[in-house]
Amino acid sequence: MIGFGKIRRAIAALVTVSFLAGAPVSAVEVDEIDWTAVLRALGVALDSWRLSPFPRMTPTPTNPPATDTPTPTNTPTFTQTRTPTFTPTLQPTQTNLGQLAFGPSTGLAPAQRLASAFLVFPYVVHSGSKETLVTLINMAERDVRVNCFFIKDAGPVLGCLEVGFSVNLTPLQPFSWYVGDGTNNPLTFTAAPPFDGVGELKCAVDPEIPDLDAHNVLQGRATVFDDDDGDTVAYGAIGFQRRVPGHYSGVISLDGFTYDQCPERLHFQVLAQQSGSNSSLILTPCEEDLLTQTPTSTVVQMQIVNEFEQVFSSSRDFTCLSVLSFSSISTLRRSTLGTDTAHLVLRGVSSPLVGMVIDRFTGGPDNSLHSSANDPYLEGGRRSTVIFP
């Protein structure tokens, strides 16, 4: 049951509602109210609320404020103006970057200055007053056996001549010898035969265990000097790392999986040939079959870009080893290029290449002739194989 206090409050509310709805109100006490009349007045009030909008004092606005309108229209305008402006500007720059006439390169070039499993010395000499000091460094804490081959071009009749030997390197120690004298150490059973002429040297690690860290342990350096005039050129060997564990088989698969790939092309910043200086370009094939003594021949494509970005081209073919003076390449002469320096890009057609440039230039108080080794920047990668007996 409902208490009389609540009824009185309800009646007071109904009286107010009846007044709002237009029902007559008599000045009588609440206790004398006719309940039938109250209920009738309540029904009238409820009907008026359902049919009339009068009680809705704060209607909900149907339109959003005018200040909200620019917000959605700004978003699509910002997106559409940025996207087409950004994309076409970037694409041509990436596509044409450094391609020249050789097309895009693929693969990865071998990383340098790392302990490696296979080394190439592109230039070793014992001829007249010139001599070469070769240094092999074992970076491991165990003995390492290394197989090496000297290769030189003996002319069209004899072809490529090879001299093979093995050396044992003690832990964390360098091993050096003059190529014209050779070396023989009965304590370590290490011997390197004497070598004469101009050629290259290739060395591969033959580890006792198949672990990867037993392969990548070798670094090398060569110093070529002239006893008569003191001219000296020193350079680091080009290194190829082993990528997967396994036993040494004599087949150096430079495929990017077993060993690093050979470089696709070589880049040099060179001095143009001019009066008083004549630099040299030295190249050797990255692919070689030393087991059957099959010589490797290839054609070298050359792109030369002068300081005005004018492009010149040339080509040469060689077998075993190539030592070319800049004076023999017309596009590397100052009179042809028109500038003192040039960007030289090289690519072997049938076989990838490795090599170096010896810069020769005059300078100093007496304007004397100086020499410096010029190591290449290696770009891209190509599959190749070197086979040891």
Image (cartoon, rainbow, N blue to C red):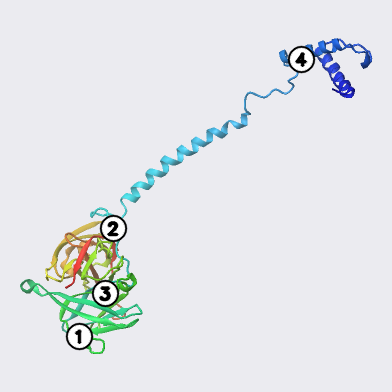
Q: Residue 284 is drawn in which quadrant?
A: bottom left
On the image, numbered disc 2 is attached to which residue? 107
Circles 4 and 3, Cβ within 8 Å, touching? The answer is no
Q: Position of residue 24 (x, y in %)?
A: 86, 10
Badge 4 element = helix
Q: Amino acid at mark 4?
A: Leu
Which residue carries the number 4 mark? 46
The CA distance from mark 4 to mark 2 is 86 Å
Relative depth, front residue between 329 and 110: 110
Q: Which residue has dot 3 on it?
A: 205
Amino acid carrying label 2: it is Gly
First-in-chain label (1 vs 3): 1
Q: How far across and how far down the image is residue 352, in percent? A: 21, 63
Q: Residue at x 82, y 17 (%)?
A: 17
Please say if 33 is above or below 357: above
At x 32% / y 66%, what residue is drawn?
111
Instruction: Give x and y (percent) for residue 279.
Output: 22, 71
- Residue visible at 23% across and 55% down in the picture: 102
